[in-house]
Image (cartoon, rainbow, N blue to C red):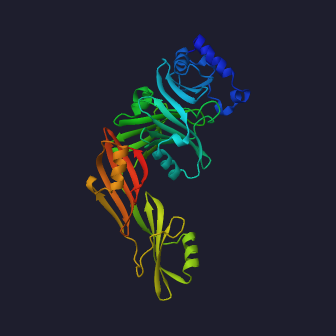
């Protein structure tokens, strides 16, 4: 519903008009609303939060219901999420990468190596505080959400809009169950709602990224405003997951390594070690003349530091060992005590290859929230995921 623009809203209009011509006609910002399309209660709410803003633009995330203001002030950039009734749902302030929690930086560096960092935001107001990071990785735009501890929540790709124009990033926000459209709520009947993120895709269509529990199975769902499920996948809650696969055909990189380092070889066995369906190691035993030799290589066919002892020539043995709170390594317990005060162990396991621990997976509960944390074989933190 269009309303007359109040004096405060008029200030916002002036700020919008201060944007450059290129910004105003940029087709990648086609979702930007004209001043008269923004409810007065929304502009008033934003002006109350940031009375000294120098520029602002608005987008509608949920038609006639939820609006996002990209705000610039003399000292910061921010996004304010406001309902059509002028209720501020969320405020997120732009921060430097160095100001992110160490857990967030570790997650980004290990899961998006070489990515172009664009923006980071810290949520300073809202029901659930946390962080959001904007990246370009393999020519795709990612928005990655973390909770206040730095644990991974969700990621979405291909948001509408170009980050860095007039606000800190394309519009996206966490959304409460009660604020979901009725068809979306109906589609979730029989499931326990965990959390949701509302975005718009490249075409400006609203997409609801929702985590639910269905009979003990954690699901990640993408739905449109009509409640149609666009994508569905199970979120793994398993412990350490290492498997070995016998190779019937050698990868080219492994053959090249053997031709260089074991000329005249005959293969006795070749095995790939997978973690969560991704190859992380190769173990191969060969005979060269009358001598037997074996090699342990990483996924890039480089020798691992822990090579087999002299005389060994057997396929790898993968072992999963369940752990209790008392048998967790000291380094892991210290990390949990420091970052998750009051944690209670749900389950934990270590994964070893030839008696060398490669990984620890630990599921803990803090209050009513569950986390899956991963540590390397030395007990060094790798990542945390909110379940």
Q: Nearer the viewer, residue 324 or 84?
A: 324
Name the image quarter holding the N terminus.
top right
| In front of the other: 117 or 64 | 117
Residue at 51% across / 48% down in the picture?
108
The percent coordinates of residue 55 (x first, y second) are 63, 24
In this image, 5 relative to 308: left or right? right
Question: In this view of the protein, which residue sits in the foreground, 178 or 287?
Answer: 287
The residue shown at (53%, 43%) is: 98
- Residue 244 sits in quarter: bottom left
Count the marks. Answer: 0
> Measured along the vertical axis of the image, is residue 153 above or below residue 42?
below
Q: Is residue 28 visible?
A: yes
In which quarter of the view is residue 148 placed? top left
Farthest bottom residue in view: 290
Residue 37, compared with residue 349, is above or below; it is above
What residue occupies the far right of the structure in this picture? 21
Residue 135 position, x and y percent, is: 57, 43
Residue 385 shown left or right of residue 93 in the figure: left
Is the C terminus in the top left, top right, bottom left or bottom right quadrant? top left
Residue lying at 62% horizontally and 18% vertically, measured from the top left: 12
Q: Is residue 312 left or right of residue 118?
A: left
Image x and y of residue 332, in percent: 35, 53
Q: Position of residue 117 (x, y in %)?
A: 59, 44
Q: Is residue 215 in view? A: no
Q: Residue at x 41, y 34 (%)?
A: 187
Above or below, 347 against 53 in this view is below
């Amino acid at each position: 519903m269009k309303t007359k623009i109040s004096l405060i809203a008029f200030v916002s209009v002036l700020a919008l008009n201060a944007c450059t011509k290129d910004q105003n006609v940029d087709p990648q910002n086609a979702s930007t609303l004209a001043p008269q399309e923004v409810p007065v209660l929304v502009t008033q709410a934003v002006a109350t939060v940031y009375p000294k803003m120098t520029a602002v633009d608005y987008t509608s995330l949920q038609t006639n219901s939820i609006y996002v203001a990209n705000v610039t002030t003399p000292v910061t950039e921010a996004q304010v999420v406001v309902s059509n009734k002028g209720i501020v749902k969320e405020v997120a302030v732009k921060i430097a990468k160095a100001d992110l929690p160490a857990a967030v930086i570790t997650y980004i560096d290990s899961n998006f190596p070489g990515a172009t960092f664009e923006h980071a935001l810290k949520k300073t107001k809202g029901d659930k505080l946390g962080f959001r990071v904007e990246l370009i990785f393999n020519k795709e735009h990612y928005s990655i959400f973390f909770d206040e501890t730095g644990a991974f929540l969700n990621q979405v790709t291909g948001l509408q809009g170009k980050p860095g124009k007039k606000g800190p990033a394309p519009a996206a926000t966490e959304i409460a169950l009660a604020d979901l459209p009725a068809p979306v709520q109906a589609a979730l009947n029989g499931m326990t709602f965990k959390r949701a993120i509302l975005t718009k895709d490249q075409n400006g269509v609203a997409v609801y990224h929702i985590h639910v529990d269905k009979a003990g199975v954690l699901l990640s769902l993408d739905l449109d405003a009509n409640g149609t499920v666009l994508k569905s996948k199970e979120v793994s809650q398993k412990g350490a997951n290492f498997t070995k696969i016998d190779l019937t055909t050698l990868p080219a990189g492994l053959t090249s390594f053997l031709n260089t380092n074991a000329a005249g070889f005959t293969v006795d066995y070749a095995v790939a070690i997978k973690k969560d369906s991704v190859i992380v190691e190769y173990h191969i035993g060969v005979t060269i003349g009358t001598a037997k030799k074996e090699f342990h290589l990483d996924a890039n066919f480089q020798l691992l530091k822990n090579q087999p002892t002299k005389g060994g020539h057997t396929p790898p043995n993968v072992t999963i060992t369940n752990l209790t709170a008392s048998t967790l390594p000291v380094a892991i317990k210290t990390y949990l005590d420091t970052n998750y005060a009051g944690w209670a162990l749900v389950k934990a396991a270590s994964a070893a290859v030839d008696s060398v621990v490669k990984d620890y997976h630990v599921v803990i509960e803090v209050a009513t929230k569950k986390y899956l944390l991963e540590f390397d074989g030395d007990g060094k933190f790798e990542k945390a995921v909110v379940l």
